[in-house]
Image: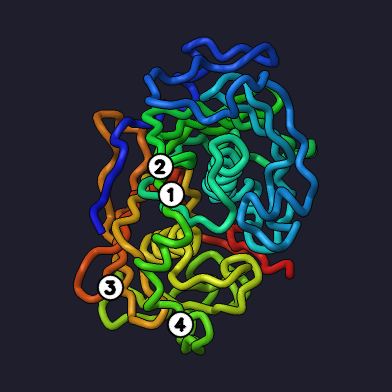
Amino acid sequence: MVQLTSRSASMSVESVERAGYATGAGRAEASSGSPEETGSPAGEEPGRREGSPDRLRQLVHRTDPLDVFPTGLTRLTDTQFSVPAHWPRAHRFFAPVGSHQDPLLIAETMRQTTMLIAHAQFGVPVGDAFVMWELRYTSASERLELGEEPWDITVDVSCSRIRRRGRSLGSMHIELLLHRRGTVLATGGGRISCTSAAAYQRLRGHRGAVLDAPIPLLPAVAPRTVGRTSENDVVLSPGTDPGTWLLRLDTRHPTLFGRPNDHVPGILLLEAARQAAHAATGSAFLPTAMQADFLQYVELDRPCRIEATTLPADGDDPLAPAGMFIRAVQDGEPAFTCTLRSPELHPAGPGDVRTDLS
């Protein structure tokens, strides 16, 4: 599988606001682009679509309503959309990190928003397969402090470099801006491609047997070493060398494996990267910036090694946070890479672990 990524960098939340995001009065300008074709039905006027809970679960590929974050969809133009969403204050898996919301809620909301738009506005049939080649976001810790107010957010989306596959979608780039109560929470983006159910069967049909095969559950590292309180949420198993682990897969996990899958879900790889960063630094790691590249499918029934390397501070800013580079290697080939950055690293304490609320 060839890696195809967008290399445009996410703007910082501060730069978005300097560029003209007005509190409560509009949106940042959409990124430029000249799509080859638009994705909305011909002649349809921009408007709001409220989805039923059952329909939303289907369109964001989640089976449990507790794991569904978008609550609706408004089409602004043929390539620009607004998606309201709600973050729980205490999700069973995306639990708070100390006094902050879990930044991986940003990644999961981006993922769900992208699939919702692809299905509802670009004609991708339910049952087709998505490949997220790249996902990136930038936030700031002070924007994620829990506070007392409900976490109702809005995701503004701009789609570009849209390529059609017949009446459906072949691929597109996406830029997203998440905001709440007049404050930008995060910016991000990525690139997806879509594969028809028939083509996916030809590509991955030989892996269908793994859906019914038991996947050995490896021993877990101590939960607190990876920022967790419950072994149920640990996705790393001890490795043979310092700074390395084996990927641990519990296919009974209600969020990570909420639906049958013939490969390791992307959100599990992001969680593995975050847990590896926490373990490698021994610190309360709050990933306020992330750049992830999904290079190939990670198979469920073959060992996958997770490796962590410390990175210097970003750029010329002496106050920029240090980071970690995480790599997943399977069958001797890199399958996934992720760069994470966290501000103000300090030794992890009891308040910096996330509690299993299931």
**Which quadrant of the view contains residue 240?**
bottom left
Residue underneath mark 3: 330
Q: Earlier in the sequence, mark 4 or mark 3?
A: 4
* Alpha carbon separation for disc pair 1 and 3: 24 Å
- Left or right: 296 with respect to 150? left
> Is the residue under label 3 in contact with that under label 2 (CB below 8 Å)?
no
Residue appearing at x 46%, y 53% in the figure:
130
The type of residue carrying mark 2 is Arg
- The label nearer to you, 1 versus 2, is 2
- The label nearer to you, 1 versus 3, is 1
> Is the residue under label 2 in contact with that under label 1 (CB below 8 Å)?
yes
- Secondary structure category for the residue under label 3: strand
The type of residue carrying mark 3 is Gln
* Alpha carbon separation for disc pair 4 and 3: 17 Å
- Left or right: 270 with respect to 353? left
- The label nearer to you, 1 versus 4, is 1
Residue underneath mark 1: 194
Residue underneath mark 2: 165
* Alpha carbon separation for disc pair 4 and 2: 29 Å
Q: Earlier in the sequence, mark 1 or mark 2?
A: 2
